[in-house]
Image (cartoon, rainbow, N blue to C red):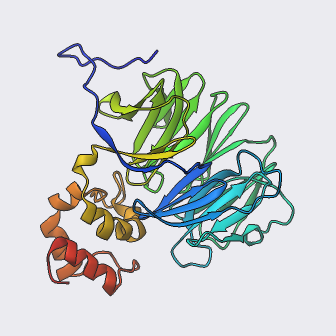
Amino acid sequence: MLVLPLLSCAGHAPPPLAAGPIATLADTRADQVVSQGDITYALGHDLTILRGDVVITRVPADCPAPCPATLWTSAASIPALDGDGQWIVATRFDGTLWRVRIDGTLEPIGARFGLADEAVRAVAGAGTTIAVLLDRAVLVTTDGIHVTRYVLATPRDRLAVARDRVALAGARGVEVWDLAANQRSTFAVAGARPGFLDADAKGARLVVVSPRGVWLERAGELQPLAVANVGAIAIAGAKLWLEVGKRLYLAGEQRGVVGTTVATAAGEPMFGTPNGDVWVGASGLRRYSLDARGRDPAWDARVQPIFARVCAHCHLPGGDAGVDLSTPASWAGEHDELVRRVLVTRTMPPAGTVLDGADRSALAAYLHAPP
């Protein structure tokens, strides 16, 4: 049964949020889906790679016979280990760690973490933090060069990463490591799956899901959400999508848990994207956006890839800059200031962050101003 908070004045649950499909891949099955700017990687027995909503690469994944039903066990977008951009990395059923290139080719990268024959259980990354989970250890780097190995007294089976934070789940609950403060916290939630909202932001918040419910971190404590019987969740940037029965819901700070107009087949896997969308599907993939009618294709094509690469580390909701620039609406609201600082004075992005001439021209074209 789903429990929703009641509105104090009307005594009724809020109306469902409008959400609609913006892409359908009927013939694509994925174990993992991960996005990087406007590129989406769907990893299954085929490697399907999209730019926007158009398939640009589809190749069969190399898999020895008999190939298991689930080929990929985790995937993440991480800072490139050669210092150039971002990489898509993934772990397979056989404990190997790979970089997935945009043409669908695979590069083994276990040796970059000092691994030989050790099996990798999961990989995760956010900001400059990367973690690799082994059977009895976790490897952590915050610069892509220096790797620290932490030995685990007991095995952990799930991993999540935020900026300067690592969450590990095991039989006794979830342990969260604050790497910057050198502190550890434990939350006694059995059978838990951890994740982070706004994982790339300084104010990332822990989410814990178990068969008993869903908890969200507030002021260093876990607070339960008013929802039960959650079949699946997907963290999509600052949004938390929930599948309850045969419908998708969104959990938010202000409105509680609110239904959407999206129906599902129940029990379908879900994968979030950094811009707040969600991919749903077992035998086929469908991408949903909160109010697809309000999307701006020009922003998606011209701005969003640059934002994800250059701006997201400061300008996501709750980011260091204090100004959210993660949506077309936010760009419209800050239009004049963006023109002034990005194109005229060129004081943004700040020193140390590269915005090349092609990127600046693309932003100028979107803002209808000279570069």
The C terminus: image quadrant? bottom left
Q: Which residue is drawn at the image coordinates 64% and 53% (left, top)?
A: 44
Classify residue 108 by image quadrant.
bottom right
State the residue in front, 120 or 265. Answer: 265
Q: Which of 214 and 56 is in front in this view?
A: 56
Q: Place residue 129 in its image quadrant.
A: bottom right
Residue at 22% x, 16% y: name it. Answer: 8
| Residue closest to the far front | 27
In the figure, residue 16 lies in which quadrant? top left
Q: Of 184 and 13, which appears nearest the observer?
A: 13
Residue 162 is at least partly visible in this image:
no
Residue 63 drawn above or below residue 302: above
In the rendered view, tell whether residue 309 sits above or below residue 70.
Answer: below
Is residue 107 shown left or right of residue 217? right
Specify whether 286 is left or right of 149: left
In percent of width and height, residue 299 lies at 27, 64
Q: Can residue 27 be seen in this view?
A: yes
Residue drawn at x 65%, y 40% as measured from the top left: 175
